[in-house]
Amino acid sequence: MRAFPATRLRRLRAQDFSRRLVRENLLSVDDLIYPVFVLDGENQCQPVASMPGVDRLSIDLLVARAGEWVALGIPMLALFPVTPAELKSEHAEEAFNPEGLTQRAVRALKAAYPGLGIMTDVALDPFTSHGQDGIVDEQGYVLNDLTTTILVKQALSHAQAGADVIAPSDMMDGRIGAIRQALEQTSHVNTLIMAYSAKYASSFYGPFRDAVGSASNLGKGGKTTYQMDPANSAEAIHEVGLDLQEGADMVMVKPGMAYLDIVWRIKQEFGAPTFAYQVSGEYAMLQAAAQNGWINRDEVMMESLLAFKRAGADGILTYSAVAAARLLA
Ligand code: PBG
C-alpha cells in the first residue's frame, strides 16, 4: 500500500487566509528608521549618484519633505550632515558647534514635528580632514580617549539641540559610558543612546562615504583599528555587553544583511532592543540590480526588510524606509 505523508506542510500554504494566519513575522512602519543626509544652504537638493532615490537636502527641504514621512508614520529619522570641506579640521571642532548643520537640523525638525523621533550620529568622520572617526596621532592611529572627550562634547551639543537619540557610530572604547555620564550630569536623563555596538570594518559603507564626502579611500587599513573584524561573532556579544553596562538603551548591528546571524545572536543573548542598519552599499546593490531589471525592486526590498525582523531586529535603519512605508500604507 502507498504511504501518504502524515504531515503536508503545503496544506497551510494553499490559500492566502491560512498563509496569513500562520505568518510568524511582520514588517510594520513602526520598525523603520529613515537615514537622511543634510546639506548646508537653502533650497538645496543633490541626488547621491551611488544611491538612486536618495537626495541630500538642505534643512528647509528636509523639513518640507518630512511632512509626508510623519504622515506615513515613520517613527524616527537619523541625521547625517554633509560638512563643507572648509569646516573640516584635524580636531573636528565643527562636530560640537551649537550652530552646526546637525544641531540646526535637529532644532528645525523638532520645532516642526515634536512627535517625530530624531537620532543623531556621534562620530568625527564628517568633520575630520582625513575622514577617520577620531583624532589621529602622527602615525595616523586614532587616539581613543582624546577622541572620546570630543565625542562627549558632540553628544551634549546634540542633546542640547533637542535630539531624542544619540547614536555613537565611532567604535571608541568607553564612549557610551562617558556620554551617558555627561548626559546625566547635564540633566538629559531621558536622552536615549542607540549604540552602534557591533559595527564592522565593512566595504559596504562606500556609497555613504561618497554621500557625506568623508574620504571613501581612507588609505591602508581603513577603519580596521577600531571597527570590528567581519570574521568575528563572539566579539559582538562582548561589545554589546559592555555598551549595555555603560548605559546604552538600544544596540545596533551594522551592516545588516550580511550580519543577520549577529542580530540573532545578540537578541537571543541580551533580549535588549536590537536594531540593524541596512547600509548604503546594500541599498546600492539592490537598486542597481533593480535598475537593470534583474530583480523586482519592491519585492526584494520588502523581503530583505522582513529578513531583519525574522532575525530578531526590533527595527531597521534603511534608505528604503519611505518606499517601504508607502507600500505598507
Ligand atoms: C560614520 C558612519 C558611517 C556610516 C554611518 N555612520 C560610515 C563609516 O563608518 O565609514 C555608514 C552608513 C552607510 O553606509 O549607510 N561614523
Image (cartoon, rainbow, N blue to C red):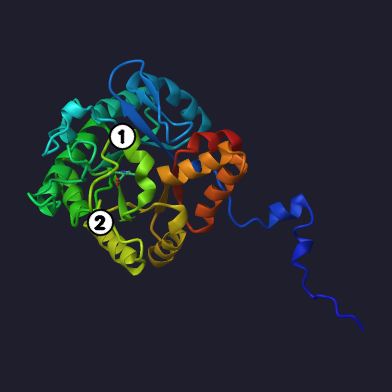
> What residue is drawn where x is 53% and y is 48%?
305
The answer to whether the beta carbon of the residue marked 1 is less than 8 Å from any atom of ligand 1 is: yes
Q: In this image, 297 relative to 274: left or right?
A: right
Q: How crowded is mark 1: few (under 14 residues within 10 Å), some or many (20 or more)?
A: many
Q: What element carries label 2?
A: loop
Residue wearing tag 1: 212
Cβ atoms at labels 2 and 1 below 8 Å apart: no
Which amino acid is tagged 1? Answer: Val
Q: How crowded is mark 2: few (under 14 residues within 10 Å), some or many (20 or more)?
A: few
Residue wearing tag 2: 224
Q: State the image coordinates of residue 59 (x, y, percent, origin top left).
A: 33, 22
User: Which quarter of the figure has residue 162?
Assistant: top left
Q: Can residue 79 be seen in this view?
A: no
Q: Is residue 22 above or below residue 84?
A: below
Q: What element carries label 1?
A: helix
Q: In this image, 316 relative to 196: left or right?
A: right
Q: Is residue 36 visible?
A: yes
Query: Dividing the image into four equal quarters, which quarter contains ligand 1?
Result: top left
Image mark for residue 295:
none
> What residue is drawn where x is 33% and y is 36%?
210
Q: 205 or 59, which is in the foreground? A: 205
